[in-house]
Image: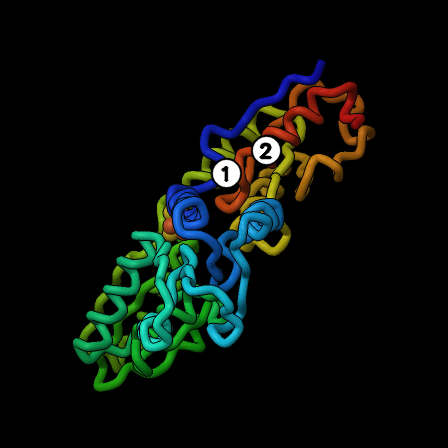
Amino acid sequence: MIEIELARVYGFCPGVRRAVEMVEEHLRERGPLATLGAIVHNARVVDRLASRGAQGVRSLDEVATSAVAITAHGAGPNVVEEIHRRGLGLVDTTCPIVKRAQEEVHRLSEGGFTVLIYGEATHPEVQGLLAWAGGNGHATLVPSDSPLARAGRLAIVSQTTKEREAFWEFVQAVVGRERGALRELQVVDTTCPETGRRYQAAQDLARQVEAIFVVGSRNSANTRRLAEVVRATGVRTHFIESEDEIHPEWLTGLSRVGVTAGASTPDEAVQAVIARLRGPRGEP
Ligand code: SF4
């Protein structure tokens, strides 16, 4: 039988677990609700919640229930205001770590800083942070794309799921570029330690096994990045959404494999992969 090692840290982070539990509690005690975007980037969880009455919507115009949930990624103050204006109940599952980033961005913007966010401008969390910056924000992953700070006052924060080291490299590059024009600089490290903990645990696991299965949705940015980090160690890496994608021949000749999962992957998906791996050479 093949030996299976689980990463020390894997799967749902506290923020996503909390968001799913809050939605489940509302479904149980108050009935159906809409979720503004996917509550978690995982089809298995979204389908399960949808079957119980949590309908994913892209905008408030599509909401057909009396309550709406903001996801763990958070949203701008404009969205919260609009939810109240429409008389909808609000289930705010914004992760406390994202909430802190929003508060920092708001404080810095109110304090007269140009707020530069190290992150993907189209990501829902970053869209929310930009809204909290109230027009004084700019998001990019490319240091040369940073805006000139208004009156030489620049603040830099990060999308929470970015790697800490990458964030500080970005800060250094921006400061090197803007040094001549800067009068005041504030840097707030708003990266989330959960992401780094998963990467580190996966890298440690890679040293102990012959192949690693990374479980999670392909539309989950954090799981895609986790797979990249694992692949970069040189260990054979299989990025799968479910146990059905495992080819039995992948296991030929292996005696020890590892399993890890992104922050949006539920335990049941990981357990299903382990059960399949424990089967006769990965056969269903
Ligand atoms: S990765 Fe971190 S910031 Fe994002 S939801 Fe999870 S705990 Fe919160």
Label 2 near ligand 1 (CB < 8 Å) = no
Task: Return the x and y of residue 248 as percentages of the image width and height.
Answer: 81, 29
Which residue is the site of mark 1? 11
Label 1 near ligand 1 (CB < 8 Å) = no
Q: Tell me the SS state at disc 2.
A: helix
Task: Return the x and y of residue 9 as percentages of the image width and height.
Answer: 45, 33
Mark 1 Cα-neighbour bin, 10 Å: few <14, some 14–19, many ≥20: many
- In front of the other: 14 or 253: 14
Kindly identify the amino acid type of the residue bearing the numbered disc 1.
Answer: Gly
Instruction: Give above or below for 206 relative to 148.
Output: above
| Residue that protrudes farthest toward the bottom in the picture | 151
- In front of the other: 174 or 37: 37
Q: Quadrant of residue 101?
A: bottom left
Task: Return the x and y of residue 16 as percentages of the image width and height.
Answer: 43, 47
Residue at the image point whose x is 54% and y is 42% from the top: 265
Q: Quadrant of residue 231?
A: top right
Calculate the distance from the C-alpha at mark 2 to the C-alpha at mark 1.
8 Å
Relative horizontal placement of residue 30, taking residue 226 as reference (left or right): left
Which residue is the site of mark 2? 270
Circles 2 and 1: CB atoms closer than 8 Å? yes
